[in-house]
Image: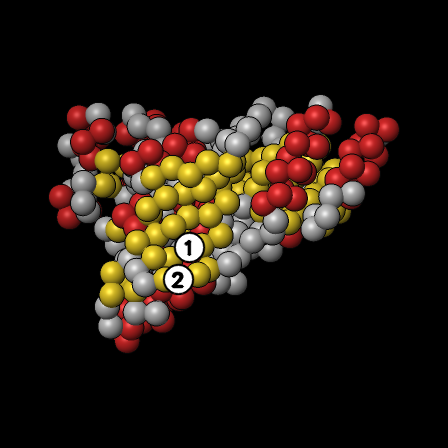
Amino acid sequence: MVRTQETLARLAAIPELTVLTGAPLSLYTRFAIGGPADIYAETGSVEAFIAALQVARASGQNYVVIGGGTNLIVSDDGFRGIVLRFIAKRILAAGHRVVSDAGAVLQDLVDFTVDSGLKGLETLAGIPGSVGAAIYGNAGAYGHAIAERVRTVRFYDGRDVRVIDREQCEFHYRESVFKRNKDWIIFSTELIMETADASELRKVADDIVKVRNEKFPVTMKCAGSIFKNLMIAELPDSAAERVPERVIREGKVPAAYFLEEVNAKGMTRGDIHVASYHANLLYNAGAGTAADLRALIEELKSRVAREFGITLEEEVQYLGFQDGARA
């Protein structure tokens, strides 16, 4: 307790840093699930964030950095330690160049580029989460991903603030170098866009949002798809042979196909439900718990593994669980 009070005092002394104790992490996740953090601190200042991170490291306590919480499952017990969050949201443009802070909402960035007549992100419309998270997980949809537009990413590697280009980001399907270096903190990204008719871009974006809202209503307490889609070329022959050609898109098999085959639709555990219309959508119907959510995820993975001999991989991240699960 003494150490926590000392850490709290040091964090509170950092200008432009908001510090809370016992903050319920359910307020910072789209699932609306999760117990309290011992200390929660957020800022839109790079300097303040680095200072807070240095305090957290020197404290000897557990600490973690979170983004928008869209793909985060927090333990019902919360997190014993320090939770840091970078919340800068600026979006600027000059010609074909767009610079966005990591804390900006991805939809805000999509809307900004669409309304500016800049083509390249409109197919990402409706994807929840922050820009930093989109870079981290190379968010994409409809055959396109944010990696296609990234020129550079500015981040903190634990010692220095660095800038790397798209090639150095090592983007792959839902992967990046940042996902393999979880201590690297993304601050901003520079994107290169193309000029296009704003009204045409708006129609594309709005049509996509309409489809997304039918599957993932904005009021639904969910993370969108729970599991990553699978590359058909990477499946064992025994599983690949069972996949109908009609479900393969751009070399990928939707995880929902395998889940449907094991009767996942409509499954429940407590107040956690698998949508009756989408086997890869789990949501909190109101009073769901992290324990039930994780148990249902494990049950779905077990069913698919038994039936197809493959392991589904979560898109979500775990925080605060005693076994150290991160996904």
Between 106 and 197, the one lying in front of the other is 197
The amino acid sitting under disc 1 is Val
Place of residue 281 in the rendered image (x, y in percent of width and height, measured from the top left): 42, 49
The residue that label 2 is drawn on is 93
Residue beneath the point at 42% across and 29% down: 180
Residue beneath the point at 35% across and 36% down: 169
Quadrant of the drawing holding the N terminus:
top right
Location of residue 120 with respect to 225 vertically, above or below: below
Location of residue 210 with respect to 47 vertically, above or below: below
The amino acid sitting under disc 2 is Ala
Left or right relative to 299: residue 192: left
Mark 2, other Cα within 10 Å: few <14 / some 14–19 / many ≥20: some
Residue beneath the point at 53% across and 43% down: 72
Place of residue 278 in the rendered image (x, y in percent of width and height, measured from the top left): 36, 52
Place of residue 211 in the rendered image (x, y in percent of width and height, measured from the top left): 33, 64
Place of residue 279 in the rendered image (x, y in percent of width and height, measured from the top left): 37, 48
Q: Are marks 1 and 2 in contact (CB under 8 Å)?
A: yes
Q: Give me the C-alpha separation between circle 1 and circle 2.
A: 6 Å
Left or right relative to 273: residue 145: left
Between 110 and 23, the one lying in front of the other is 110
Q: Secondary structure beneath disc 1?
A: strand
The residue that label 1 is drawn on is 99
Location of residue 222 with respect to 300 vertically, above or below: below
Q: How is the image coloured?
A: secondary structure
Q: Which mark is residue 113?
A: none
Between 229 and 61, the one lying in front of the other is 61
Question: In the picture, residue 50 is in which quadrant?
Answer: top right
Q: Earlier in the sequence, mark 1 or mark 2?
A: 2
Left or right relative to 319: residue 13: right
